[in-house]
Amino acid sequence: MSSTPSDSNASLIEFDKVNKWYGDGLHVLRDIELSVRGGERLVICGPSGSGKSTLLRCVNALEDYQEGRLTVAGHLLGDDLKSIEAVRRQVGMVFQQFNLFPHLTVLENLTLAPVWVAGVSPAAAREQAMAQLERVRIAEQADKYPLQLSGGQQQRVAIARALCLKPRIMLFDEPTSALDPEMVKEVLDVMVDLAGQGMTLLCVTHEMGFARAVADRIVFMDEGQVMEEGTPQDFFSSPQTERGRDFLSKLLER
């Protein structure tokens, strides 16, 4: 169960009839069947409350599930803490809010986990952090505090922080939803760069321009179910379900 997929065609994430409830009545994920290959770029879209973020958070065990099987990077996610820890070492996540420590500088935010969680030396962690800040084009802000930065800059710092643990998989949960419109592009540009470097990406977003440009596959969810999936061209030109057509028509009206 601890084997690691070595080939880009291998399934890196596998949902097998996964179900999740909140409490006794709210069925938020319904028989999810979904496979993600290494290096694949998946965009998950759908109306609010459709289960998109919950599905994403299950991948790194921020949410548990009650039925089915979820395997990530060869590890079956369940109650085994060792498997959860092994998965979290390989999965980075960027949230809607930036979740940066306001009392630490940008550089200190990036070096904290590598030093205290991964056991990297402070010098190596600093070198790695600067490399990731260069990667997201914000190295000149290393000594500033988060509140001295714009929202777009803070989100790029959050992406760099996730990359410092060298994940195989990156999860993005509506990473631009808390940003002013003029800051959205700078974050999406960084995500496009990551996608071009072969990183496995799962992104929940309503940024359909990004989805068209970057996704290998679109997954459309509604009421806790995967309603349809396909290439961006297929989804945007000829969605297969009435709910998909309705969702796209409402986006186009904005």
Image (cartoon, rainbow, N blue to C red):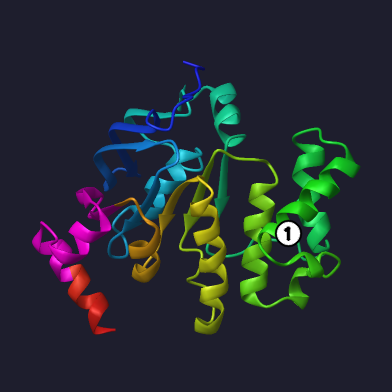
Frontmost residue, 142 versus 10 = 10
Where is the C terminus found, in terms of image quarters? bottom left
| Residue in the picture at 38% in, 36% down | 37
> Which residue carries the number 1 mark?
133
Q: Position of residue 5 (x, y in %)?
A: 46, 24
Q: Give the x, y percent position of residue 175.
A: 51, 64
* Residue at the outermost front position: 196
Q: Left of 82 or right of it: where is 188?
A: left
Q: Residue 52: horizontal and vertical position, in percent?
A: 35, 54
- Left or right: 96 as drawn, with respect to 71: right
How many numbered circles are shown? 1
Q: Is residue 162 above or below residue 32?
A: below
Quick one: 27 or 240, which is closer to the camera?
240
Q: Residue at x 83, y 63 (%)?
A: 105
| Residue shown at 51% from the left, 67% from the top | 188
Q: Is residue 12 visible?
A: yes
With respect to residue 93, does 206 lie above or below?
A: below
What's the amino acid at mark 1?
Leu
Spot the residue most to the right.
123
Crowding near the residue tagged with mark 1, few <14, some 14–19, many ≥20 C-alpha atoms within 10 Å: many
The span shown in magenta is 218-246
Q: Which element type, helix, strand or loop, lies under badge 1?
A: helix
88 in the magenta segment: no
State the residue in front, 37 or 72: 37
Is residue 65 depicted above or below 23 in this figure? above
At a point 77% along the width and 41% down the height, the residue shown is: 114
Q: Quadrant of residue 36?
A: top left
Front-most of 230 and 34? Answer: 230
Residue 95 visible here: no
